[in-house]
Image (spheres, helix red, strand yellow):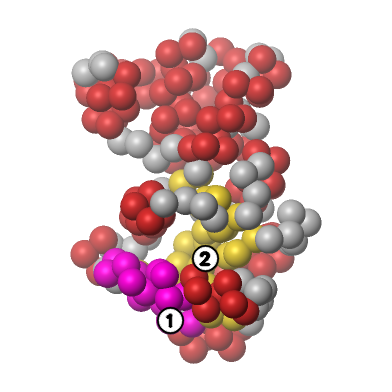
Amino acid sequence: MLALDALPIKTFVIERQALIAKALHSFLNENPMIRVVGDASSVRLEDLQRTRPDMIVFGLDNAMLDVTEALALARSVCPNVRFCVLSSFANAEVMQRSIASGADGFVVKDISPSELEAAFRILAAGSSYVDPRVAGGMLKRRYEASAGSAIGDLTTREADILRLIASGLANKEIGAKLQLSEKTIKNYVSRILAKLNVSARTQAAVYAIRAGFV
């Protein structure tokens, strides 16, 4: 976890296409909460040893690219680095495979600057983040298939709240969106955690993603 008062976030960009890498480098550096410390076409130990980033932005333009291998290599040098996949694909299966490989975040490359900043803040604080456009699309398709699992025990309202948790929203934000009090949302979250047999909302979010629910 990176303390938010320790900003800017030292960020390293991994992108195979050199022109896109430089453009992304320049774009991210315009954000005061981010300081890009380097970019490369692949994960290289010498780069990470030299720069010691807090965050790696991993450009994914090939759905078959091995995120697992890249992430393992990165964490062999920087065990606490946050790893965010920046994907060309608004595809639930690619997202699920990335999160299952251990990525902390998954965003689609057409994300807005303000949404990207929000995603980075969530990741820097130690939570997971999944682009809600991808997570939300998968929710409806997978809900019936999950009926035999612990997730299948959730009520419709609990399922809605779990989706919003996985999108990175806090209880107050969920309450505002669903027009419910923060205390009511807190009670719902407690029931969701109990049904999923987890102790933290971040674990619930990861559970939901890995189970294919979001």
Amino acid type of the residue that numbered disc 2 sits on in the rendered structure: Val
Q: Position of residue 48 (x, y in %)?
A: 53, 81
Q: Position of residue 94 (x, y in %)?
A: 68, 46
Q: Position of residue 180 (x, y in %)?
A: 26, 16
Residue beneath the point at 41% across and 70% down: 27
Residue 193 visible in the displayed image: no
Identify the secondary structure beneath mark 2.
Answer: strand
Looking at the image, residue 32 sits to the left or right of residue 38; the answer is left
Q: Is residue 83 above or below residue 107?
A: below
**Foreground: 213 or 92?**
92
**Residue 181 appears in which quarter of the rendering?**
top left
**Foreground: 13 or 213?**
13
Q: Is residue 165 magenta?
A: no
Q: For residue 37, which numbered disc appears in the image?
A: 1
Residue 210 visible in the displayed image: yes
Identify the secondary structure beneath mark 1.
Answer: strand
Give the labeled residue for mark 2.
57
Looking at the image, residue 36 sits to the left or right of residue 104; the answer is left
Badge 2 local density, few (<14 within 10 Å), some, or many (20+)?
Answer: many
- Please state the extent of the stretch shown in magenta in the rendering: 25-38
